Amino acid sequence: MATRGTISVEFADGTIRGIYSHWDNYIDHNGKRLMESYANREMAEKLINCGDISSLSSDIEDCVFYHRDLGEALSVSYTYGSIDEYLLSHEGEDYDYLWTESDGWVVVDNGKVIKMTK
């Protein structure tokens, strides 16, 4: 069974854009990979620009994206106008990861932002 999640980036204007992530979104797996391999804005944006993802890897070339690798239409799952809108919008994902300029990767749990540490 999948451990579903989202991976998102907060932009300077306050908007948030993100993708759906299907497999292994628990903190010890995808959370750890995001913090170790996608630990800056450039890498976070590069990741979400590839669209929804089936499986996250430590190297973006080894990730399995629905568009690039599985032939599906390119999809960026959502865009929100503000952090408040984002926090109110979750639809039952197990884990939601958000890149912020101030804290790097954080995990969102039941509408609360929790800073992750290595």
Image (tube, rainbow, N blue to C red):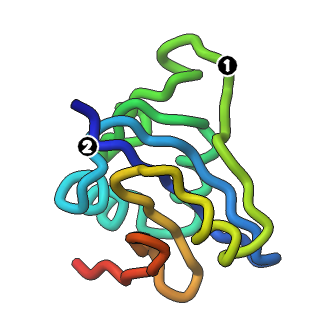
Locate the C terminus and report the quarter of the image it occupies.
bottom left
Locate the N terminus and report the quarter of the image it occupies.
top left
Image position of 65 with respect to 111: above or below: above
Q: Secondary structure at mark 1?
A: loop
Say which residue appears at 74% left-offset and 61% top-offset.
80
Q: Which residue is labeled 2 in the image?
A: 24
Q: Does 62 sit left or right of 14 as displayed?
A: left
Q: What percent of the width, then of the height, locates residue 107?
A: 39, 70
Q: Which residue is labeled 1 in the image?
A: 73
Q: Does 61 sit left or right of 78 as displayed?
A: left
Nearer the N terminus, badge 1 or badge 2? 2
Image position of 38 with respect to 74: above or below: below
Q: In the picture, residue 67 is in which quadrant? A: top right
Q: What percent of the width, then of the height, locates residue 115?
A: 37, 83
Q: What kind of residue is marked 2?
A: Asp
Q: In the picture, residue 2 is in which quadrant? A: top left
How far apart are the alpha carbons under marks 1 and 2? 22 Å
Image position of 20 with respect to 8: above or below: above
Q: What kind of residue is marked 1?
A: Ala
